[in-house]
Image (cartoon, helix red, strand yellow):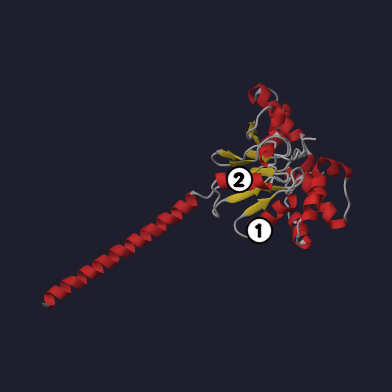
């Protein structure tokens, strides 16, 4: 009888070890799966299209393991700019978000700080942004802090550059003499499109090559809608990716996985805001 009890005891220990090993394996597998699912996602210019952002985040199946890089121009165009910024402030407490400064954000920031209404801003979406802020209760200090903390550019450990518009210094973003170029420049994307069109192999002399583009492994921008170049999806020109797919106008809002280049899109913004014009004036 004592022998039988000993056997049962040994079996119990054996099964306990098996259970522990299975549990450890499951935890390891879960952690590994989570690491493999960690994505870096770039989000194009939103321009007050809060409905589009919610829709495309859902379609992308975004999780808290993902890093989200927003390319700027959160406001101006559609009617939910203030609501959108409220959402982004909250989202930033739940997962890793990186927010780049766009030219429209600069104008809105100035208005929040001192009430100054830039005439150009007002005509290009500022009116709708002001109305959205007048419509909802919000913590002004919190919103000003959001705009204060926007980044002019982000450079990751793979030498990938993220910024709203461009830069002009041939020595790179760190040596840019005119910071406004980070959110106003269009010469960088024009250069990339030209190089893509003629082919880098056809540029025979090194001094005529696209020096700014060669400083980085990849460059990601917004600011200039891809619809200007006849496409409604994220557009590659040489080593530059344009993620602004015209959400301010008739296009969609896009999210791109920077590693796989898979992308997701919202419905066209006029379909989500059928009674508004956005920036289609």
Judge by depth and name the residue closer to the eye, 63 or 189: 63
| Badge 2: residue crowd in 10 Å (few <14, some 14–19, many ≥20) | some
Secondary structure at numbered mark 1 = helix
- Could you tell me which quadrant the C terminus lies in? top right
In the rendered image, which quarter is residue 239 located in? top right
Q: In this figure, which residue is indicated by the disc labeled 1?
A: 90
The picture places residue 220, in percent across and down from the top left corner, at 66, 40
Q: Please give the label number shown on residue 33.
A: none
Residue 134 versus residue 268 in the image, above or below: below
Q: Is residue 206 visible?
A: no
| Badge 1: residue crowd in 10 Å (few <14, some 14–19, many ≥20) | few
Write the residue at 89% across / 52% down: 116
Q: Earlier in the sequence, mark 2 or mark 1?
A: 2
Write the residue at 71% across / 36% down: 212
Distance Cα–Cα, label 2 vs label 1: 17 Å
Judge by depth and name the residue closer to the eye, 93 or 277: 277
Residue 80 versus residue 144 in the image, above or below: above
- Could you tell me which quadrant the N terminus lies in? bottom left
């Amino acid at each position: 009888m004592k022998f039988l009890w000993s056997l049962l005891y040994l079996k119990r220990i054996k099964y306990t070890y098996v259970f522990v090993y299975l549990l450890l394996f499951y935890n390891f597998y879960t952690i590994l799966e989570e690491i493999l699912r960690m994505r870096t996602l770039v989000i194009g210019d939103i321009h007050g299209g809060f409905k589009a952002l919610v829709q495309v985040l859902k379609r992308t199946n975004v999780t808290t393991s993902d890093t989200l890089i927003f390319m700027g121009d959160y406001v101006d165009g559609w009617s939910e700019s203030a609501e959108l910024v409220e959402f982004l402030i909250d989202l930033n407490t739940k997962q890793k978000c990186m927010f780049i400064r766009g030219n429209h954000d600069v104008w809105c920031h100035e208005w929040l700080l001192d009430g100054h209404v830039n005439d150009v801003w007002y005509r290009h979406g500022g009116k709708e942004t002001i109305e959205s802020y007048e419509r909802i209760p919000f913590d002004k200090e919190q919103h000003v802090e959001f705009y204060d903390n926007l980044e002019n550019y982000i450079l990751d450990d793979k030498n990938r550059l993220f910024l709203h518009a461009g830069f002009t210094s041939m020595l790179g973003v760190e040596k840019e003499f005119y910071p406004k170029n980070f959110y106003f420049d269009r010469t960088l994307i024009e250069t990339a499109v030209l190089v893509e069109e003629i082919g880098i192999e056809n540029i025979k002399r090194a001094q005529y090559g696209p020096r700014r583009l060669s400083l980085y492994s990849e460059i990601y921008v917004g600011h200039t809608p891809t619809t200007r170049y006849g496409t409604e999806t994220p557009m590659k020109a040489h080593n530059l990716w344009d993620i602004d797919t015209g959400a301010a106008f008739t296009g969609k809002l896009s999210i791109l996985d920077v590693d796989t280049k898979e992308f997701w899109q919202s419905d066209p913004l006029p379909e989500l805001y059928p009674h508004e014009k956005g920036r289609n004036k």
